Amino acid sequence: MSSTDPTSAARTPRLEQAITNPGSVKINVKGAFIVDDDPRSKSPVRTDGVHYEGQDIRLPHHTGVVSHVAVDIGGSLAKLVYFTRELDSPDNGGRLNFINFETDRIHLCLEFIKQLKEEHQGLNGGSKDELCVVATGGGAYKYYDKLKETLNVDIMREDEMECLITGLDFFITEIPNEIFTYSETEPMQFAEARPDVYPYLLVNIGSGVSMIKVSGPKQFQRVGGTHLGGGTFWGIMSLLTGAKTFDDMLAMADRGDNSGVDMLVGDIYGMDYGKIGLKSTAIASTFGKVFRLQNEHANDDDALHDGTNHTTGEVLFQHEDMSRSLLYAISNNIGQIAYLQSEKHQVKHIYFGGSFIRGHRQTMNTLSYAIRFWSKGEKQAYFLRHEGYIGSVGAFLRRKPVNWGRRNSVDEHILSNGL
Amino acid sequence: MSSTDPTSAARTPRLEQAITNPGSVKINVKGAFIVDDDPRSKSPVRTDGVHYEGQDIRLPHHTGVVSHVAVDIGGSLAKLVYFTRELDSPDNGGRLNFINFETDRIHLCLEFIKQLKEEHQGLNGGSKDELCVVATGGGAYKYYDKLKETLNVDIMREDEMECLITGLDFFITEIPNEIFTYSETEPMQFAEARPDVYPYLLVNIGSGVSMIKVSGPKQFQRVGGTHLGGGTFWGIMSLLTGAKTFDDMLAMADRGDNSGVDMLVGDIYGMDYGKIGLKSTAIASTFGKVFRLQNEHANDDDALHDGTNHTTGEVLFQHEDMSRSLLYAISNNIGQIAYLQSEKHQVKHIYFGGSFIRGHRQTMNTLSYAIRFWSKGEKQAYFLRHEGYIGSVGAFLRRKPVNWGRRNSVDEHILSNGL
């Protein structure tokens, strides 16, 4: 959840005094940590397309002014990051806040930023024009005029891929307890800092999926991706089940059994296909059981189309089973392609980000398992607690830290923005 | 279409005289060719789950007896191959006939084989027990008892992967005008014979997808696959559209426009994402437009679940568009994974087989384009006219030709079965 709701006087955000050029802001990330015990993170979701995140990041040593917010506007979600000062905290400093909006309801996002801008003025006595918005993602282009007109502020646009790697580098190197590995027995095992950060593969799963090989600071290449991503799950599930939110779909997946719709090796063989190591429980074909069962039950001309026999009311396929099947299929497919790309580009570490993951266990387990399975345990999947905000944090920071590599200096914690 | 329909006296199949052990049959494939001008191939599809293929293969020099049929029983389809003698042809010989059945209606397949058996006896005056069935695919195991009991014949089981590569080797090396490449400008460009057949990658697309690296005769390894295959397309489409046959779904795809449901780069950016070479028309997310549009139209609590506003009757998403989108997505995904596997395993030639392809232009175009795109024109997709029968032909031949490599001898055309 965001630490502040600008529509609530009790939770007024306290933005730092503005300075005219946000390009020269430096963020002091020394001692940064994730605020885990925020009681407000108990109710992170609203139902109107706005999603407050828990897990704000405290920046106890940052005392400078921050006069910008950053937003990463993707195909489905607009992810916003903004800074608030913690005037009532003993060590002062401030925090980064995270909130997202359905792109579809971009007006809610704009209202939110407008509110931040109003309070920015009220708090700092400056001009409203002093707040600047750093925008990335496709929406930075598509909604550029709208942003500019509605907010009447400067809009700085940053490249999506550059923001992603800036953001991920920041999370990897600066935020403790941010990166973790996942397995059923050890759901969240925090990764230790590595001296050899590069190269790595970033797999960002939003509506679609981008895979970016990062060879060093500012050295990157989008090596591939797939259009079978979060938007596919969301779209097909909404058609099949009528579910209205992504969280509802995930909750259904938790309760489902994919073997209700998937064709397993056992459905074809009646046993293991041992010769090539395929167990009878392995999935042979996602949704592969559907056509056959529909056929069996809809002899002639029964009106059995959507998995429900309209005459008898019999439900052949549970929404929960469909949800689990499709979530597994999409996650596993991304995992396999990510592994194969990591092989082709000789990368060992694979980071999965993007709002599709949403900290969901089944998703992380599938991705993690796929990487372990295909690499025979040689490679590992890494996740982030702020997986959906990599791009917007990158946009917030705008550039790679100039102090990259100077690990022994206090300066290492100063991320230069715009220098 | 099959050259014979055993239920019709006018088209009685003329099976060769049986010999007791089909393992010693040799098929003389000298001068084999595909029968293209068969007038019966004009009506290849029946509506009861039986699909007669055109394109029988004539074996003008085979005069021996053939006392077996071969069937490859997969998750969705059972593919049958049988031999008939051409007594009324000037050069005698015979032909291979191809027919498939929905696995779901395996009884139709068994009836057909039973009929072949009856006629086998009638024609040859032998015992019914002289007909042998070579079975492969998962159904060879799952339906073993059923096959044995219903047909009361010997059932020989052969490994699915071995049959696939035996069959493909046969098609590549023995059948002229079988293998082709596909592009929109040159829809069917027959491949020339190559002295260096190995290594190659076989991508067999049935309900699920298997990818097999073949390094030489009998040297192969299943390197991967994906469970997003024909069964996935079939299953999701039957739920979303109520279509009852695969051909109906393909026909819908022909008429559809995927941008009705897919989120394109232009939908996110409002323009090209030129920096990384993504055009505005590129697909960012399969079905990615659905959730957003459903949301827009189903403000509060409209009963808008399956893409139809039940109150107003408005149809937001055309079945044709969904079909085209999903067909593209699945084909393209298989193409990408096949390319990446071919890179990992250092293979240049990629053959696509399996009943999913069905000679459908959009499918072949997508697979072909994917290989060209990802390999930057270095690699090519190959297709087969008998793409669905690779495994059953392999089962029919049962083994790799023993004469492999002796290209200068007349014997090269004798495929030894069981030696």
Image: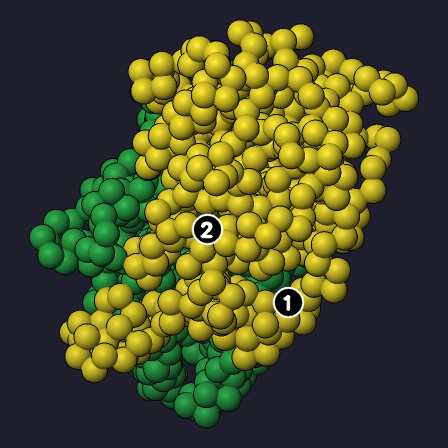
Chain colours: A yellow, B green
Q: Which of marks 2 and 1 is in front?
A: 2
- In the rendered image of this protein, does residue B213 appear above or below residue B270? below
Whole-percent x, y for residue B155 in the image: 53, 82
Q: Which residue is drawn at 14% across and 58% down?
A: B310
Disc 1 element? loop
Q: Residue at x 42, y 68 (%)?
A: A320
Tell me which amino acid carries mark 2. Val
Q: Which mark is residue A45?
A: 2
Whole-percent x, y for residue B285 in the image: 41, 39
Quarter of the rendering containing residue A163: top right
Quarter of the rendering containing residue B99: bottom left
Dot 1 corresponds to which residue?
A278
Q: Is residue B405 left or right of residue B52?
A: right
Tell me which amino acid carries mark 1. Leu
User: Can residue A293 be spotted in the picture?
Assistant: yes
The answer to whether tags 2 and 1 share a subunit is: yes
Mark 1, chain letter?
A
Q: Residue at x 30, y 59 (%)?
A: A242
Q: Residue at x 60, y 25 (%)?
A: A394
Q: Name the residue nearer the viewer: B31 or A5.
A: A5
- In the rendered image of this protein, does residue B367 appear above or below residue B221? above
- Is the Cβ of the residue at disc 2 closer than 8 Å to that at disc 1? no
Q: In this view, does B297 lie to the left or right of B127?
A: left
Whole-percent x, y for residue A35 in the image: 67, 43
Whole-percent x, y for residue A397 in the image: 62, 21
Disc 2 element? loop
Mark 2, chain letter?
A
